[in-house]
Amino acid sequence: MLQEQGASSASYLTTKEVADILRVKERKVYDLAAAGEIPHRRITGKLLFPRGELLDWIETGSAPAAAERPVVLTGSHDPLLDWAVRECGSGLATLFNGSRDGLDCFADGRAALAGLHIPDSTGWNVEPIAARGLKNVVLIAWASRARGLIVSQNATASITDFAHLKGKRVVLRQPGAGGATFFEDMLKREGMSATDLELVSGLAHTEYDAAVAVAAGQADAATGIEAMARQFNLGFVPLAEERFDLLIDRHAYFTEPVQKLLSFAQSTACREKAASMGGYDLSQMGTVRWLSE
């Protein structure tokens, strides 16, 4: 059948080849993959479709059985969440790879939940998730966080707003991180570019890494959250109140590791920890922010 359509005889097919076989646009193939309705793999960031499984899917006319997601929390790093995962004994493994990469990882079924803080036109997180066409997922509020600039003690007098970063040593977050997206938006808003800054070598892959770079004297400033600035006794310039949410697979939501984490999040111990760290608002923690179809 595939050969009759002119497709490759390779073990894995491209999105275009699959679109040709199904006689649909490539966008539809992406949507089917995002919804888990067609067998696929993501290899080095590229969608590939196992030929044998695709043939079976076409012949049976049914979606592949949903694979059980690994007990992994991916996405952006949040120090309170990191602490809670360990403190409650959830057994969740963590892969803090940034909001965008975390969303990719979740969409591919390689994680049970993902921490996100991606700015969009109306707020945070909802639009980037909705655009993926994901099925059977729920977005749960974790916390609102004070987002801004973490500033070294030596630079607190000279950096009191974003425009003062001109000519200063700045460490950047990795591409795809929510903090990186926020920083890029702020540059555009202020009519600035990366050439206005003295960029230090290397990237900060977590909120912790960003604060460490400033505390170690490697940079004058970095985008970060108030909790990290406080932990290292650094200056902080508030710029926004951001939402940090958890995207959770509905089936995984009811598993013991996820329920342990969510139950612990409502505890007095968790709220006291957030208060001691500073910069957190937990008033909406646990509320449903968005539901897929």
Image: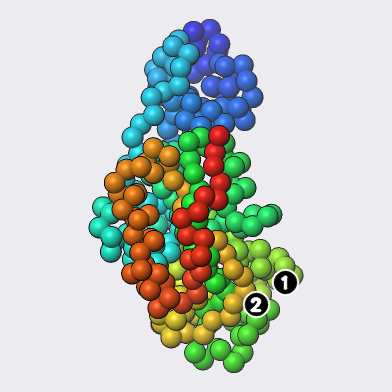
N-term-proximal mark, 1 vs 2: 2
Residue 223: quarter of image: bottom right
Residue kind at label 1, given as amino acid type: Glu
**Residue 252 drawn above or below residue 186:** above
Is 246 placed left or right of 132 in the picture?
left
Q: Kindly identify which numbered label has been placed on residue 162.
A: 2
Residue count near mark 1 (Cα–Cα under 10 Å), binned few <14, some 14–19, many ≥20: few
Check if mark 1's residue and mark 2's residue have beta carbons within 8 Å. Answer: yes
Under tag 2, what secondary structure? helix
The residue depicted at 47 percent of the width and 84 percent of the height is 234
Across and down, in percent, residue 211 comes to 44, 76
Q: Kindly identify which numbered label has been placed on residue 103.
A: none
Across and down, in percent, residue 25 comes to 64, 24
Residue kind at label 2, given as amino acid type: Phe
In front: 178, or 195?
178
Read off the residue under disc 1: 190
Across and down, in percent, residue 253 comes to 39, 44
The figure's colour scheme reads rainbow
